[in-house]
Image (cartoon, grey):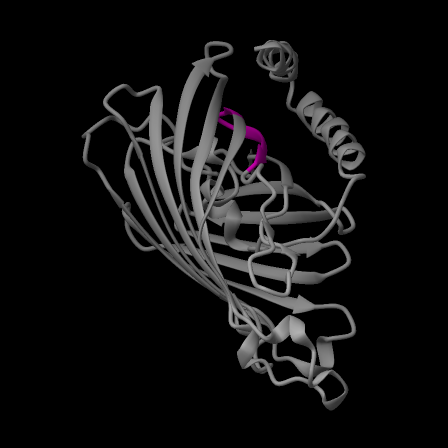
Amino acid sequence: MVLLIILRSLVIVVTRKIGIVIKKIAVLGVFVLLIAVDCRAQQDPILTSYMYNSQVINPAYAGIWEKIGFTALVRKQWAGINRSPLTESFSFHSPLRNEAAGIGLNIMNDKFGLENRLSILGDYSYEVYLSRRTRLRMGIKFGFVNYKNPLTEYELYPDNKYDHAFDEDVDLKFLPNFGVGFFMYHEYFYAGLSIPKIVENDLKENFHNYSTSAEVRTVYLNGGVVLPVDPLNYIVFKPTLLIRATWGTPLQADIAANFMIRERLWLGAMFRTGAALCFTGNWIFSNNLRVGFAMDVTMNEIYPYQNGTFEFTIGYDIDFFGRSYLRARYF
C-alpha cells in the first residue's frame, strides 16, 4: 500500500506535461540500474515486437482496450545456426464487464539447443483514474513454468566425455511464479514498470546436482509519446524507450522511432544497446486483423556466422462487448 501511494503521488505530477514524463522515465531508469546490482543471469527471451503488445512484459496491459485480443508470435534468433533460440508465443487479453478490470493469458515455448522452457501465465489488471484523462492500471501475473534439459543427449568433447553432470536428465514439470506491473497512460503517452517473474527458481533436481537458474528476475521500464505530424493524423510519430535490467547482465535499452501511416501501417527502427539494430512493421488490414514482421541485425562477434533474427506476429481482435471506442490504438 505504501508503494502504491508513493506511485500515485508521482504519476499525478508526471501527467501535467509530456516533457515531465520523459524526465521521470529517465529517473526510473537510474532506479532500475541501482536495483540491478545483485545479478546472476538472463533467461527471458528478448522480443522486438513487444511495442505492439505490451502484455508479454507487463500484466497491467491486459484488458486495456475495448476488444478481446489474440496475438501469436514466432521468433527465430540467429537464423542459420543449428539449434539457435526459437521462441513461440500466444497471448490473449480481454476487458471484463466491469470496464476497469481485465484478464489475460500468455503461453510461451522457448527452445535453446536441447533446453526447453514452457511457461503458462495468467494476468489480471485493474484500472484507476488519476485525473479526468489519465489512468493507472495495476496488474498481477501468476502461473508456472515447465523446464526440460535432456543432458544425456548432449555430445560432449573428448576431454569431458566422462562428466557425470551429464549422466541424468533434468525434467521439472511445475515451477510456480508470479509477477506485478503498472501501466500509466494518457491518450498521447504511456509509461510502464513491471517484473513479470519475481520468484527465482533454481534447478537442482538430478542425481549429480546439476544447477542453473531456471527463472531470473527481470525488470522492465518502458514509455512512449504519440506525436501527430499533421492535423489529420495521416502520419503519427511515436518515439519509445524500454530499459531492461536482468540479474547478471549489463543494463540494456531499446530506443525506437515509429511512424504510423494513415492508421494502417506501422514502420519503425530501433537501436538495442550492445546488441542489435532492429526494424519493425505492423500492417493493420482491417479493424480486427494485424500482421507484423521484425528483423534484428546483430552487431557483435556472432554477426558473420548467422543470417539474422526474425519475428512474425499475427493478431486478431473481436468486438465482443460492442463498446464505443474511446481512443485510437497507438500503443
Q: Nearer the viewer, residue 18 or 54?
A: 54
Q: Splitting the image into 4 quarters, where does residue 17 fall?
A: top right
Q: Residue at x 58, y 53 (%)?
A: 214
Q: Position of residue 206 (x, y in %)?
A: 56, 62
Q: Residue at x 51, y 37 (%)?
A: 58
Can residue 83 be spotted in the picture? no
- Where, quadrant-wise, is the N terminus in this rendering? top right
Q: Position of residue 166 (x, y in %)?
A: 62, 74
Can residue 143 be spotted in the picture? yes
- Looking at the image, the residue that sits furthest to the front is 207
Q: Is residue 16 above or below residue 67?
A: above
Q: Is residue 221 above or below residue 47?
A: above
Does the magenta-highlighted stretch encompass residue 192?
yes
93 to the left or right of 201? left
Q: Position of residue 193 (x, y in %)?
A: 60, 31
Q: Residue at x 42, y 19 (%)?
A: 127
Q: Splitting the image into 4 quarters, where does residue 212 fall?
A: bottom right
Q: Is residue 150 above or below residue 153?
A: above
Q: Nearer the viewer, residue 243 or 211?
A: 211
Q: Nearer the viewer, residue 166 or 117?
A: 166
Q: Main secondary structure of the magenta part?
A: strand
The residues colored magenta run 184-195
Q: Position of residue 72 (x, y in %)?
A: 37, 56
70 to the left or right of 36? left
162 to the left or right of 84? right
Q: Residue at x 67, y 53 (%)?
A: 42
Does the magenta-highlighted stretch encompass residue 17?
no
Q: Splitting the image into 4 quarters, where does residue 239 fall?
A: top right
Q: How many marks?
A: 0
